[in-house]
Amino acid sequence: MVGDSSIGKTSLLLRYMEREFTDCSSTIGAAFVIKTWGVHDIAIWDTAGEEKYAGMTTFYYRNATAAVLTFDMFDRASFQNLIQRYIPILEDVTSAQLKVIVATKSDLLNTRERKVTQMEGKQLARRCNPRLKCDDPSLPYFETSAKTGHHVDEVFEYIFRHFFPDPNKPSPFSSKEKEDSVVLDEEPRETKFNCCR
């Protein structure tokens, strides 16, 4: 997960993992969780958005399979920074096969004027994922609220299902040991949030 500081990345991740809203302080360096999705253990890294940590956080981009590019829909600068700062770095991460664009704080739409349109978000999602079909209705763009939970599950499950359509089917890239493991859970389970602050 990448994006500017104080736009709600950590709150979004905590809403997904802990099923509650937490107003978080800025992440220092990076925080991570492990999400068990069927037979797959998926590491989700929440990177710091402050520019002074840029050198440190780019270390966590290496070998990432997917990136969640997050911005505050009421803060135009946070959207521009995705384009000018974060996307150019991710273009060098060849392993990042999917880039999901996520707007935060949709619960404020009734009281504040948005600074980034839904169309702009969708256009960026299309631009960042040239391998997806242009007419694909399931474009990787989501407008979310960590406060209400709106579209939060959809963000992460879109990513998981993109790579593992059947969560209980081993990946062809899994080790022999992983393929031989027994699935103990019928439903995906969650682990506690581990914060590196």
Image (cartoon, rainbow, N blue to C red):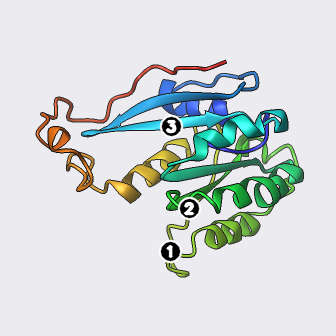
Label 1 sits on residue: 132
Residue 7 seen in the current view: no
Residue found at x 27% / y 53%: 173
Q: Which residue is drawn at 27% across and 47% down?
A: 167
Q: Which of marks 2 and 3 is in front?
A: 3
Name the residue tied to disc 2.
Answer: 140
Q: What is the number of the mark on residue 176?
A: none
Measure how far apart labels 3 and 1 are at the Cα level: 23 Å
Say which label, 2 or 3, has the lower sequence index.
Answer: 3
Q: In which quarter of the image is the C terminus?
A: top right
The residue labelled by disc 3 is: 44
Kindly indicate whether the residue at mark 3 contacts the one at mark 2 (C-beta within 8 angstroms). no
- Side (left or right) of 111 relative to 177: right
Q: In which quarter of the image is the N terminus?
A: top right
User: Disc count in the image?
Assistant: 3
Element class at badge 3: strand
Mark toward the start of the polypeptide (1 vs 2): 1
- Please tell me which residue is depicted at 21% across the width and 31% down the height of the picture: 185
Q: In this view, does 19 lie to the left or right of 163?
A: right
